[in-house]
Structure formats: structure tokens, C-alpha cells
């Protein structure tokens, strides 16, 4: 049953292509007025889930309620109050920044005078106030991404879907977009976010799910997931013969993982490992607290996904 305080409710969602299951009966509820994350490796079903939620891809089975509207049957009515930042920018390079916003607003039946009134605020929000007459082809990658975000807000949506919104951006542009997304949540908007940046999810999401092979393998608050799935401390060790050294000292931690030439000691107390490292001067180490990326790797594995 849908929650009265949910912006998006999914139950029993299934989707297959060519007999291969992409989404295998998932369900979750995204509370209104917060950032909800959907994480997973490539091919886990994230983008397909978003497409089903927007009515762009019909599911094989399951129930989707977006702002109380049944999807895909009532997708048009739901999308009138939804904004979308796609994985790849699809701005029109032949038009100016301002023209891109004006043209996009027509899809929502907005009057030109209303859109013109909104444009200065949208561009100021996106840090593009001085680029109104610039052609899209002259913008940097970060500017294009911020314009795509501004365009997604042209209809003043209640719910914003963001599919990997900061991929390919430099740290400065990424932090600026994070700041803008936090502002949107503070305004009461709901964000549905997919990302491969675990720091992004940890900073922005109040709740999230982890998908793997089309199934939900974890759900909760990022900090709760870290506390429940991972030992509190991590020591990364690398250098000459680091892997052999680590295997010989497996008993110094609760869990040992090897990735390439780096060994990861997951432990409650790092003192025994630090004492052993003091005697192994050829090795390099990094001591840190466990984070969401550690949870992600534990749940989905370290193997490369294409």
C-alpha cells in the first residue's frame, strides 16, 4: 500500500529484455521531500527502473505510483509535475541558453510570459546568469550540466529524477551541483538520484537502495548501512609484496579483501595492524573510517561490470 507521505511507490516491479531479467520484482517507497538514492553497478537495473517510473518503458509486472498517479496509465498527468536530468545532456546545440529553456517549457504548456519570468531565477540558481544569450555549443561541460538541471526545473516540479547528474564533471562543478540539489530538498522537493559516486550518495541521500542483478540487496539511511554492514575501520596497504604480506597477517583483522595490488583490512581495532606496519617500512598504508563505497563493494563485489 502506498504511503501518504511518499512521492514514489513501487511494488513487484519486473522487466525483461529478450528473456533476460533486468528488474526482478523490486519494491521500495521514496518519501516526499528528501533525496532518495538508487545505487548499483552497471547493468543493475537503475536506468530501466527510472524509465519505468516515468512511463517511458512499460514494465512486465508490478505497480508504480508517482505522486499518486498510476504509471504508465497516468504518466502524462504525473510528468506535468516532474523534472528529469538525463544521464547524457540532450540540450539543443543550435539554440541559446534562454531559447533552450523557452522551447522545453512548451512541452508543459507554459505560457511564454510565464517562462520568461522564471528564466532569470533559474539561471541564477544554476550559476549561469551571465550566459543567457550564449549558444549551448560554447558552454563547458559543467555549464551544460547545470543548464540541464535548470531546464528540469522550468515547470517547478515536485519530483526531480536525476540519472548520474555529475558524471564527467570536475570537483568544483560537482560540489556546486551538490549545493544546488541540497537547496532543492530544503525547498521541499523530492529527488530520485542514481549515481556511481558513493560520496555523492552519502552526502545527499537521506535514504537509498542498492540494486544488484535487478534486485534490492540493501535499503536504508547511508550511515545506518555503513554501521550495519561494515567494520568501522579500514586500513589500505599497498607497495612491494603488500598482498603476500597481508595474507600472512590475515588474523589481524575481521575481514581481508584484495583488489589488484592493494589489500584492505577491515577491523574494529587498527592497533595490531599499525604495529605490524611499523616493522614493514617498504609498505604504504592509509587508515580511514569505513564509508558507503565499502558497503557497495561488499554487497555487489569488486569485479568489473560493463
Image: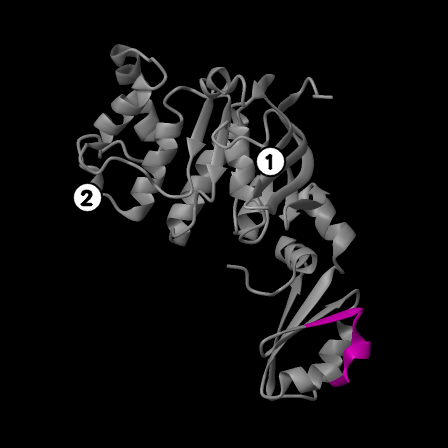
x then y, percent, for residue 263 = 65, 75
Residue at the far front: name it.
19
133 vs 104, left or right, is left
x then y, percent, for residue 233 = 72, 63
Please name the residue that numbered disc 1 is placed on. Answer: 36
Q: Secondary structure at mark 2?
A: helix
Residue 29 vs residue 180, the one in the foreground: 29
x then y, percent, for residue 281 = 63, 88
| CA–CA distance in space, label 1 to label 2 | 33 Å
- Check disc 1: other Cα within 10 Å, few if <14, some if 14-19, many if 20+: many
Q: Can the viewer see residue 29 in this picture? A: yes
Q: Does the magenta run of residues contain 5? A: no
Please name the residue that numbered disc 2 is placed on. Answer: 138
255 vs 123, left or right, is right
x then y, percent, for residue 213 = 63, 50
Q: Residue at x 32, y 38 (%)?
A: 90
- Coloration mode: one colour
Span highlighted in magenta in the image: 248-257
Q: Does the magenta run of residues contain 255? A: yes
Amino acid at each position: 500500500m502506498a504511503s501518504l507521505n511518499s512521492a514514489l511507490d513501487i511494488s513487484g516491479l519486473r522487466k525483461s529484455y529478450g528473456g533476460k531479467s533486468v528488474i526482478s520484482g523490486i519494491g521500495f517507497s521514496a518519501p516526499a521531500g528528501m533525496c532518495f538514492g538508487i545505487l548499483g553497478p552497471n547493468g543493475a537495473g537503475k536506468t530501466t527502473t527510472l524509465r519505468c517510473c516515468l512511463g517511458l518503458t512499460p514494465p512486465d509486472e508490478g505497480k508504480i505510483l508517482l505522486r499518486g498517479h498510476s504509471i504508465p496509465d497516468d504518466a502524462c498527468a504525473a510528468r506535468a509535475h516532474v523534472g528529469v536530468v538525463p544521464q547524457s545532456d540532450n540540450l539543443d546545440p543550435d539554440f541559446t541558453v534562454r531559447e533552450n529553456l523557452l522551447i522545453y517549457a512548451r512541452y508543459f504548456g507554459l505560457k511564454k510570459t510565464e517562462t520568461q519570468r522564471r528564466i532569470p531565477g533559474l539561471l541564477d540558481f544554476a550559476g549561469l546568469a551571465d550566459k543567457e544569450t550564449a549558444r549551448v555549443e560554447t558552454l563547458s561541460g559543467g555549464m551544460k550540466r547545470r543548464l540541464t538541471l535548470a531546464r528540469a526545473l522550468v515547470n517547478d516540479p515536485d519530483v526531480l529524477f536525476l540519472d548520474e547528474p555529475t558524471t564527467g564533471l570536475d570537483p568544483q562543478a560537482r560540489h556546486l551541483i551538490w549545493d544546488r540539489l541540497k537547496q532543492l530538498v530544503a525547498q521541499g522537493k523530492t529527488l530520485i538520484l542514481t549515481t556511481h559516486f558513493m560520496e555523492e550518495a552519502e552526502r545527499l541521500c537521506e535514504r537509498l537502495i542498492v540494486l544488484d542483478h535487478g534486485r534490492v540487496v540493501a535499503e536504508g539511511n547511508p550511515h545506518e548501512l555503513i554501521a550495519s554492514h561494515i567494520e568501522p575501520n579500514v586500513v589500505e596497504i599497498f607497495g612491494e609484496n603488500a598482498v603476500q604480506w597481508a595474507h600472512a597477517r590475515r588474523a589481524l583483522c575481521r575481514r581481508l579483501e584484495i583488489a589488484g595490488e592493494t589489500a584492505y583490512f577491515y577491523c574494529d581495532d587498527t592497533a595490531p595492524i599499525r604495529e605490524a606496519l611499523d616493522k614493514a617500512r617498504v609498505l604504504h598504508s592509509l587508515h580511514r573510517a569505513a564509508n558507503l563505497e565499502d558497503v557497495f563493494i561488499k554487497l555487489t563485489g569488486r569485479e568489473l561490470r560493463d
